[in-house]
Image (tube, rainbow, N blue to C red):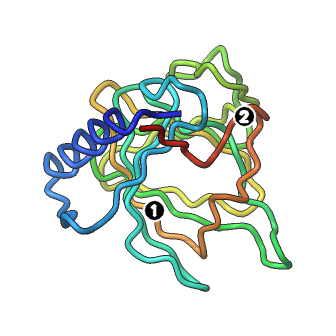
């Protein structure tokens, strides 16, 4: 749960990241602050701006603060539709992306988050590099020391149906006055 004043602080901080990377986000475009119900947004969270999300495609910008982690999850089949396929393109900073495959947690470069993780195949994305994650693939990601900005290009996004490894995760941020 986030206090409204904290939400506003994180939104302003997110906009400053976009400015650093020369990514224009207009004042009327909404920034979502996701705290995943952990009340530890500096370690577990994600800030995003969705440009478009139709029945076929989605485009969004995501900001991670320094060492902030988006928790492990996968995009599953819902209502007869395949889970989301997404391509991440690093725009700023360094992104540690972990997907299913070879790798173990003792050798990763990221800091283990205070959430459950089970996949440790490490992909490091620097500005201009990208990686495609297919439906039903467990993944989690974390920014390096300077934070990161990721452009996501995907099929329809239904974030509310993501399946998290850590069952205590709450995808919808609750804002209190």
Q: What element carries label 2?
A: loop
Asked if 135 appears above or below 139 in the picture, the reply is below
Asked if 22 appears above or below 92 in the picture, the reply is below
Question: Closer to us: mark 2 or mark 1?
Answer: 1
Residue 41: give x, y in percent of width and height. 46, 29
Looking at the rendering, which quadrant does residue 22 occupy?
A: bottom left
Q: Which of 131 and 157 is in front in this view?
A: 157
Residue that extends furthest to the front in the rendered view of this protein: 177
Q: Identify the disc placed on residue 152.
A: 1
- Indicate left or right for 84 with 48 as reference: right
Quadrant of image for the C terminus: top left
Circle count: 2
Asked if 34 appears above or below 142 in the picture, the reply is below
Label 2 neighbour load within 10 Å: few <14, some 14-19, many 20+: many
Residue 27: give x, y in percent of width and height. 19, 64
Q: Residue at x 29, y 67 (%)?
A: 29
Asked if 1 appears above or below 154 in the picture, the reply is above
Q: Which residue is drawn at 34% across and 62% down?
A: 30
Q: Identify the disc placed on residue 46.
A: none
- Indicate left or right for 19 with 115 as reference: left
Q: Which of marks 2 and 1 is nearer the N terminus?
A: 2
Residue 123: give x, y in percent of width and height. 53, 40
Q: Which residue is drawn at 22% across and 49% down?
A: 15
Q: Which residue is drawn at 41% across and 66% down?
A: 50
Residue position for label 2? 119
Looking at the rendering, which quadrant does residue 103 occupy?
A: top right
Quadrant of image for the N terminus: top right
> How far apart, in angstroms, are the residues tagged by discs 2 and 1?
21 Å
Q: Is mark 1 on a helix, strand or loop?
A: strand
Label 1 neighbour load within 10 Å: few <14, some 14-19, many 20+: many
């Amino acid at each position: 749960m986030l206090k409204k004043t904290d939400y506003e602080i994180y939104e302003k901080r997110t906009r400053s990241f976009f400015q650093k990377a020369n990514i224009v986000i207009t004042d009327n475009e909404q920034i979502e602050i996701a705290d995943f119900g952990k009340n530890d947004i500096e370690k577990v969270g994600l800030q995003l701006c969705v440009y478009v999300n139709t029945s076929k495609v989605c485009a969004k910008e995501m900001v991670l603060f320094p060492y902030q982690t988006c928790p492990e999850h996968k995009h599953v089949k819902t209502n007869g539709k395949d889970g989301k396929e997404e391509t991440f393109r690093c725009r700023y900073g360094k992104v540690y992306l972990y997907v299913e495959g070879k790798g173990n947690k003792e050798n990763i470069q990221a800091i283990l988050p205070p959430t459950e993780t089970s996949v440790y195949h490490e992909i490091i994305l620097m500005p201009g590099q990208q990686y495609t994650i297919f439906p039903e693939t467990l993944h989690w990601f974390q920014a390096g020391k300077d934070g990161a900005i990721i452009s996501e290009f995907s099929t329809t996004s239904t974030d509310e149906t993501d399946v998290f490894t850590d069952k205590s995760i709450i995808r919808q941020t609750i804002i209190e006055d």
